[in-house]
Image (tube, helix red, strand yellow):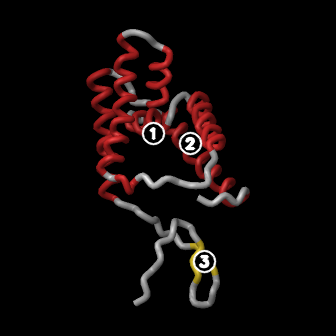
Amino acid sequence: MKPQPILRAGAPERDNRHNSRRVSRVANFTPASALIGGALIGISATLLLWLNGRIAGVSGIMHGALQRRGDDAVWRWLFLAGLIAGAGAWLWLAPPAFAPRAGYSLPLVLLAGALVGFGTAQGGGCTSGHGVCGISRLSARSIVATLAFLVTGMASVFVVRHLFGVAS
């Protein structure tokens, strides 16, 4: 039996007649790490709400850390440091999980980051605040915001990949 190539989702695949057809395989899907990561995010958001009375919206936490002084800023900086330390620990434990992506210029990445920041300000929060905490509280505003994030993300991927021709 001939080994099957690993393809990214939606990549063209050639059959015996050299016709291209779309396949819907997801490369590198690991349900265990997704479940563990999701559980840790949920536990962290719950603990922050129970112990500190705060919603775990990362954009709001960062905005507050940059704007406030005193005791309120301390927990925010500790939260942000924990995010960075957690990513650093995962990089140390599983270096292959962090393969660098080539072909993206620094100005393009900075522009993308600025657009995300602008979007979180316009949406009144980010996916962590609306998607994780807001939906779990059955907030209609958060459900609408999360749907808007998803639809905008899908439209952006379609435009970049299919209209601009930029591959992932």
Percent position of residue 76, x then y:
39, 22
Foreground mark, 1 or 3, reads 3
Q: Residues within 10 Å of mark 2 (few under 14, many from 20)?
A: some
Q: Secondary structure at mark 2?
A: helix
Q: Amino acid at mark 1?
A: Gly
Of residue 94 and residue 143, the one placed in the foreground of this image is: 94
For the C terminus, give its image quadrant: bottom right
Q: Which residue is mark 2?
A: 149
Q: Residues within 10 Å of mark 1 (few under 14, many from 20)?
A: many
Q: Is residue 146 above or below residue 66?
A: below
Q: Amino acid at mark 2?
A: Phe
**Residue found 44% across the figure and 31% down from its top:** 58
**Residue found 34% across the figure and 35% down from its top:** 85
Q: Which residue is mark 1?
A: 131
Q: Which of the two labelled residues, at mark 2 and mark 1, occupies the earlier sequence position? A: 1
> Marks 1/3: CA distance?
34 Å
Q: Is residue 76 above or below residue 160?
A: above
Tell me if label 2 and label 1 are in contact, CB under 8 Å: yes
Percent position of residue 50, x then y:
27, 26
> Marks 2/3: CA distance?
29 Å
Q: Amino acid at mark 3?
A: Arg
> Marks 2/1: CA distance?
9 Å
**Residue found 30% across the figure and 21% down from its top:** 52
Q: Secondary structure at mark 3?
A: strand
Q: Secondary structure at mark 1?
A: helix
Which numbered marker is on residue 21? 3
Q: Which of the two labelled residues, at mark 2 and mark 3, occupies the earlier sequence position? A: 3
Judge from the rendering whether residue 158 lies leftward or rightward of residue 74; answer left or right. right
Q: Residues within 10 Å of mark 3 (few under 14, many from 20)?
A: few
**Which residue lies most toward the right here?**
163
Of residue 151 and residue 17, the one placed in the foreground of this image is: 17
For the N terminus, give its image quadrant: bottom left
